[in-house]
Image (spheres, rainbow, N blue to C red):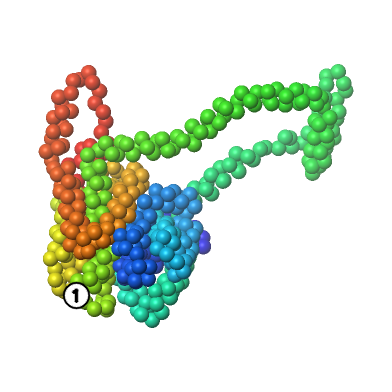
């Protein structure tokens, strides 16, 4: 497929085809991980392991996808969205099919948690990158539609996997879902790149540097020594190849002793120069990593950005376990027999998709602070989690699941808020840091809740812990963004002596509560 120019592709045209294919890519990749709560009771019955140990499967698949986001972004930047999506289709499908033959829970953590999780991380980075390339003014709308694919996938796959388990068993379900994931390679077809991938640009630059001009075009005379007569090489148009051979023979026949002495001297110097050359190579290799660590340190020195990362970690630690344990809560409390036609996981997923669109629209309103909006979603989600142990009816669990799903749509605000804090130029690195915090929370959350159940044989303490973590995250973020902190910093900077140069703050240094 031919390339297109960026000017013609922005905000329309083929970009809407990209939105459709990337939506389907996230639908196919995240459908099973988002509805992993349906598979969780089956794994408990199959492997007879504790709830804490089994919970590592669901936590790893989502945690690895976020923890590896910097690596996945680098792969997309160097190889392009299309090859990365094709490779991710192989990983997701292979991991799901391999999980059907898992002999124990440890193997399942690797096949479903690590392999599928890494494939999902590659899909997520590739789909967002190619969508941002094709849209500018309508980028928010396009990203909202694309990211809704994960929620729709979780809603559909929850019911689909229930039916497949009833018909073909757990292993047959994983094989069929893995076969469906192979369609990710078809979704990669329409992803026409607007810019050359990094590896191709570097290859072209190297090849261009290696191209050397010819020694001569039409040689006429080659003088070997002033004491000897000149050798005249008569050439005619079209005889350049024969002349090249003659010149090479004459040059080879020249004094070889000089060449031998030069090689010997170079060999003696090699021992002294090798160490310094290795040091220079190491310095060049480590320079990007040192710069990355330096920029990360600058980000973490900012109050608002640091507390935003902490709030994302607290939210992921407390709000993700309900997606995994909600069905088991209803079964263990005797609120339902078997599995409902519309599982609680499906309700969480579809409401999460609606929440993403709703919160995205609210964040664009000029009179709403995106930071306060995110803090409010944390408080609402935490209150819903605290009410789950008190609920004694399945209808009540459905309502609370819907509330948790709507507030969980705040994941669509993370890149928006990060852009407002650090600016668009530093968005990629800063958003990777935020996602790493979220990944750690997702990895730790379900096992901690499972261990609470193994310890107390009840989900009450576990959900109280989850709700408290989410509420504290919202309170911390709300307190960190109060205007009083900015006024205090302004007074301190005004009282500094004029002789001391003031440090130039980051873009977030002047961030106040009115940031949207």
Question: Circle 1: is it few (<14), some (14-19), or many (20+) Cα within 10 Å?
Answer: some
* Residue at left offset 25%, top offset 23%: 501
| Residue 79 relative to residue 295: left or right | right
* Residue at left offset 56%, top offset 46%: 203
Q: Against 491, is 191 above or below?
A: below
Q: In x, y percent, where is residue 342? A: 26, 76
Q: In x, y percent, where is residue 383? A: 14, 59
| Residue 222 relative to residue 377: left or right | right
- Of residues 106 and 424, the one nearer the viewer is 106
* Residue at left offset 11%, top offset 38%: 484
Snapshot quadrant of residue 410: bottom left
| Residue 218 relative to residue 79: left or right | right
Q: Is residue 140 visible?
A: no
Q: In x, y percent, where is residue 352? A: 25, 64
* Residue at left offset 43%, top offset 75%: 172
- Of residues 1 and 400, the one nearer the viewer is 400
> Which structural element holds mark 1?
loop
Q: Is residue 33 visible?
A: yes
Q: Against 218, is 52 above or below?
A: below
| Residue 332 relative to residue 200: left or right | left
Residue indicated by mark 1? 335
Snapshot quadrant of residue 139: bottom left
């Amino acid at each position: 497929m031919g390339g297109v120019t960026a000017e013609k592709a922005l905000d329309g045209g083929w970009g809407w085809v990209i939105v459709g294919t990337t939506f389907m890519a996230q639908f196919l990749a995240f459908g099973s991980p988002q509805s992993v709560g349906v598979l969780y009771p089956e794994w408990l019955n199959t492997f007879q392991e504790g709830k804490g140990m089994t919970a590592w499967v669901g936590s790893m698949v989502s945690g690895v996808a976020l923890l590896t986001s910097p690596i996945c972004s680098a792969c997309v930047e160097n190889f392009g969205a299309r090859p990365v999506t094709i490779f991710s289709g192989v990983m997701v499908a292979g991991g799901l099919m391999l999980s059907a033959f898992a002999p124990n829970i440890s193997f399942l953590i690797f096949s479903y948690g690590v392999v599928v999780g890494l494939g999902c991380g590659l899909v997520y980075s590739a789909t967002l990158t190619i969508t941002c390339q094709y849209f500018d003014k309508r980028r928010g709308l396009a990203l909202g539609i694309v990211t809704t694919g994960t929620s729709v996938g979780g809603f559909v796959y929850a019911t689909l996997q229930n039916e497949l388990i009833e018909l073909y068993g757990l292993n047959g379900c994983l094989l069929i879902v893995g076969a469906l994931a192979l369609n990710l390679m078809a979704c990669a077809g329409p992803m026409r790149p607007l810019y050359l991938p990094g590896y191709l640009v570097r290859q072209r630059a190297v090849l261009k540097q290696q191209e050397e001009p010819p020694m001569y075009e039409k040689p006429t005379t080659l003088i070997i020594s002033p004491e000897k007569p000149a050798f005249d090489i008569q050439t005619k148009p079209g005889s350049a190849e024969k002349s090249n051979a003659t010149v090479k023979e004459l040059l080879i026949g020249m004094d070889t002793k000089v060449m031998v002495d030069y090689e010997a001297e170079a060999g003696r110097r090699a021992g002294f120069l090798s160490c310094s050359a290795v040091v220079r190579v190491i310095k060049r290799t480590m320079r990007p990593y040192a710069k990355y660590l330096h920029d990360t340190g600058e980000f973490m020195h900012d109050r608002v950005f640091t507390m935003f990362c902490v709030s994302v970690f607290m939210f992921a630690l407390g709000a993700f376990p309900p997606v995994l344990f909600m069905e088991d809560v209803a079964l263990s409390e005797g609120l339902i027999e078997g599995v409902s036609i519309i599982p609680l996981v499906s309700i969480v997923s579809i409401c999460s998709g609606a929440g993403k669109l709703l919160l995205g629209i609210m964040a664009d309103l000029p009179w709403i602070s995106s930071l306060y909006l995110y803090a409010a979603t944390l408080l609402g989600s935490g209150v819903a989690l605290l009410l789950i142990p008190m609920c004694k009816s399945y209808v009540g669990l459905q309502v609370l699941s819907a509330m948790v799903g709507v507030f969980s749509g705040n994941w669509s605000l993370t890149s928006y808020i990060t852009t407002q804090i650090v600016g668009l130029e530093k968005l990629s690195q800063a958003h990777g840091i935020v996602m790493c915090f979220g990944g750690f929370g997702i990895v730790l959350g379900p096992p901690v809740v499972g261990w609470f159940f193994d310890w107390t044989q009840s989900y009450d303490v576990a959900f109280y812990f989850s709700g408290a973590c989410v509420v504290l995250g919202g309170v911390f973020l709300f307190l960190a963004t109060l205007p009083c902190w900015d006024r205090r910093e302004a007074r301190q900077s005004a009282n500094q002596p004029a002789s001391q140069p003031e440090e130039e703050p980051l873009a977030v240094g002047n961030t106040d509560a009115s940031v949207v």
